[in-house]
Image (cartoon, rainbow, N blue to C red):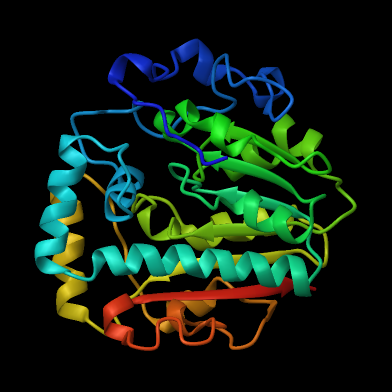
Amino acid sequence: MTYEPPQITAEDVPPPPTAATAAATTADAPVVTDQAPAQGPPSAPLHGSGLMLGTAHSARMYDYFLGGKDNFQPDWEAAERVLQVLPTARTIARTNRAFLHRAVEYLTRTAGITQFLDIGTGIPTEPNLHQVAQGALPEARVVYVDNDPLVLAHARALLRSSEQGRTSYLQADLCDPAAIIGSREVRETFDPARPVALTLISVLHFLPPEHDPYAIVEELLAALPAGSYLALSYATTDFAPAEMARAAEVYHQSGVALRQGTKADALRFFDGLELVEPGVAPIHRWRPDPGAGSQLTDADISMYGGVARKR
């Protein structure tokens, strides 16, 4: 059955957490899984002040680029300004999504991974990660994590697990990795003795400038057992520096942080890990399906991706 997204208005979206909610520990928060409805306060404090419908949001802009319906006027206005300076933005979003699917196919069918921690999930777009993973291994388990209340409003699409597997949703912030790792959702969904694939797809470059993305990734990986994997994609200025710089300026003017880096910057996320061939590469060149993306240039995409194993 195809998921039909609900028509969301500001009134439908959970309010930002109060001071009391923000002070609560994740141990006291409700678990949102395929066996329980999405309700109650978030399991961890949000970064910033909730939905903020008056400003653009990177996840809703991404939804617009993918042709989704769950974005608001500031989002599509900002996205259209990005398209004026970076006409391939829609292609980048679609190619990034295809990279996620190929990475999950590799992690399940080749590496045998059955547990996924997907941070920066975004608004559901079929096929979602758990549909790809459970299509290969029906027993796969997925914990989705995002800090946008609009994603929580769509959580039911992410909780339609296979009978053998399980999915859960955690509203939390990548800037607080300890809260994610220590959450009830992670503890009750995963087998701690089995490896986990940490997926950070097109999210690290949206971290606010005061946060260190390398330290965050290191902290998350440190909590995962040997044999776990890291899969990520990261924006780059290596191939179309002028266009990417103009796009970054549009994001900044719209109130959205955006950092970009070189291949060396992307490689640094995988320090100490065993990279899967072909290593860190433009995402359309990472284990492409036959004939897919053959007309795309690196400048069209301007995004690196890679998958690596923790020893």
Horizontal arrangement in the rendering, residue 222 relative to residue 57 (left or right): right
Instruction: Tell me what residue is drawn at x 33 percent, y 28 percent.
Output: 51
Vertical arrangement, residue 109 with respect to residue 7, above or below: below
Q: Quadrant of the N terminus?
A: top right
Looking at the image, the residue that sits furthest to the front is 1
Relative placement, left or right, of 304 versus 255 is right
| Residue for point 50% across, 70% down | 99
Q: Is residue 89 left or right of residue 289?
A: left
Q: In the shown orientation, is residue 6 left or right of residue 129?
A: left
Q: Position of residue 223 (x, y in %)?
A: 74, 52
Residue in front for this viewpoint, 307 or 175: 307
Q: How many numbered tags mark residues here?
A: 0
Query: Does residue 120 sit above or below 29 in this rendering?
Result: below
Furthest-right residue in this view: 193
Q: Is residue 96 above or below residue 266?
A: above
Q: Residue 235 in the image: x percent, y percent?
A: 36, 69
Identify which residue is drawn at 73% across, 30% down: 184
> Do we see residue 182 in this rendering?
no
Residue 108 x %, y %: 74, 65
Q: Position of residue 79 (x, y in %)?
A: 19, 52
Query: Which of the 4 image quarters holds residue 33?
Result: top right
Q: Residue 245 appears in which quarter of the rendering?
A: bottom left
Residues 286 and 6: in front is: 6
Name the quarter where the C terminus is drawn. Answer: bottom right
Residue 18 visible, this angle: yes
Judging depth in this view, the residue of 23 and 286 nearest the camera is 286
Residue pictured at 46% horizontal, 57% vertical: 212
